[in-house]
Amino acid sequence: MALLEIEDLHVSFKTVDGVVHAVEGVSLSLDARKTLGIVGESGSGKSVTAQTILGLTRFPNATISGRILFDGHDLLTMSTEHLRDVRGARIAMIFQDPLSSLHPFFKVGHQIVEAIRAHEDVPRDLARKRTIEALRSVGIPSPDERFTSFPHEMSGGMRQRVMIAMALALRPDILIADEPTTALDVTVQAQVLELIQALRDDFGTAVILITHDLGVVAQMADDVAVMYAGRVLEQSSRETLFTEPEHPYTWGLLQSIPRLDAPRTGRLNPIAGSPPSLINVPRGCTFHPRCPYAPPPAFETEPALAPSQPGHLVRCHLPIEERKRLWQSLQKEHPVLR
Amino acid sequence: MGAYIVRRTLWAILLLLVVSFLTFVIFNVFPSADPAALRAGRNATPALIEQIRRNLGLDKPFYTQYWIYLKGLLEHFNLGYSYYNTESVKSEIFSRLPATISVTVGGFVAWMLIGIPVGIISAIKPRSLLDRIMMGGSLVAISAPVYFLGLVSLFLFAQGTGVLQWAGAAGSYVPITQNPGTWFNSLILAWLTLAAAFAAFYARMTRGNLIEVMHEDYIRTARAKGLRESVVITKHGLRAALTPIVTMAGMDIGLLLGGAILTEIVFNIPGIGRYAYDAIVNADLPAIQGTVLFGAFFIVFANLVVDILYAFLDPRVTYG
């Protein structure tokens, strides 16, 4: 059985403009020690999906349905008391902006000590020792001095390391990383990813990696789900996704990655159009307004997420042979980085 | 930090000089009752008034008067002598200071103890019935002036005048050193009246700040760590939400130490506010000048304390 199983998750929010359907029928599963990448543009529902796992979207104006099974228990119906035992201790989370995610008025050491003592009844000095150890393990130089630093006294990369130290201090089964490198300098991004990767391998932590960056997925993920307008459009192993992608949206994502070795025509290849509003989702296939290949049924009915081969799910009306043929010809005119 | 405090103190002294000069100018330029005539009494001869005028130094040009005043102030911290009863203004003010401090500190404790919890409860469940009742009530409290609320409370609860004779009446103030029980009893209505508007305002501030803070990313982190919601609110939420409120409280205390004029008049408490009021009625320039300077000093001083305090409350703030 999978470590974490998301089944038919729906999340919507009531706002003044209407009901936002942020997540519509997402099913995902994560095995122990594996890394699942969730890729998508802003507003694709990937962050909401991740935050719903830990109940961080439990607000009066949110409607949530489906099941999120962790260790055989449904996190969605779990009492707040029990959910609290899972949060931080068994499933931990790091966020996009480490500066705003750390409390500005508390020393970073204290913030980690607090996380440890929320779950384990350990004396203060032992928690302090473990915190310094955690800070050391994420590569923070002179961790006993950094223990008393405030977040604003550190660089962005160091702050994210603190967040990672906090998340991994209790050796959780799952680490949810919600765009962990997006707010960081490019030079630091790679270091932070390598750190997450190294700790994952050392501790055997399963990782859910939320990102809009396919490069990040290529580096770290075992499996990938591509999300769009609150739905999963394609889901497969990493190899399959990069060698035999079958959804036109995935093609667009792959082709929009800039290449250093491409001829300098001076143009990037973005996907035409912009993501749909989640209040008025397009009828039919949600991607059809931006899809150059949309067949007539895509304007009327939404395709199901169906297997094209074992372990490869695609939500598309195009016949499988047609998809393979289109990808082949696209490859010829605009080869994609692999 | 040291250089910052010195710089701020020099500015404060300059500001107080400007305040004293402006008070002098206003008193001399705008028409007011003639202090000499007031002093001389009802059946005074013009010669007597003239003599009093000379004795008080009122016949000299106002810049000379100001210079004499300033010299006394800077050389002996002498605030001059009342035109009305020749008492030293400095000792008059200092003898009234305990009453004003009593009103201010008691009122402060009351409004913080009421305002902050009300704000927190409202913020936890915004738009709930409880929230609406408390915020509606606070609007009433903010809108009710002290002289209205004070008189109503005296009519309802004061010994002698009240329907329910629970608390001390107006004018029953005794110093705390004389009898703490009577002191408390004599001030309780004044405290609650003074606190009403402040408590309401602080409740609304607390509510607004806390609601805003609870949407911050670091609150999400606190929840994701597995902290109890009560800890998330009272530790992580309040720590950030109360910082501006603590500094505001410092300023309000400074303002009130200069004399809670309306409260002291309604409850007939012999404090600085009451003294300032009498000074204005009697066109008693040295007393007016003294109370204005005193009030300005407390405000300037509170400002400085608050700014320094802020550097301790918010580690991101530094002064160079």
Image: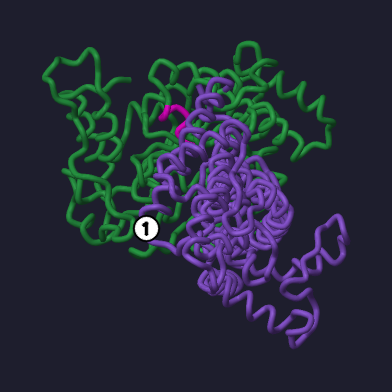
Q: Secondary structure at mark 1?
A: loop
Where B74 falls versus A332 (above or below)?
Answer: below
Residue at x 33%, y 63% (from the top left corner): A17
- Other residues around mark 1 within 10 Å, as few (<14) / some (14–19) / many (≥20): few
Name the residue furthest left.
A265
Which residue is nearer to you in this view: B190 or A326?
B190
Q: Would you name the residue on which mark 1 appears?
A: B30
Q: Which residue occupies the foreground of this view, B157 or B24?
A: B24
- Residues in magenta, as a range: A178-183
- A106 over A292 or under it: above or below: above
Instruction: Give the residue type at disc 1.
Output: Phe
Q: Residue visible at 42% across and 56% down?
A: A24
Reply yes or no: does residue A181 show up in magenta. yes
Q: Colour of chain B?
A: purple
Which picture quadrant has residue B119? bottom right
Chain A, hue in figure: green
Q: Residue A50 magenta-drawn?
A: no
Q: Residue B288, image x and y in percent?
A: 53, 54
- Res. B8 in view: yes
Decide if residue B14 is on the left or right side of residue B299. left
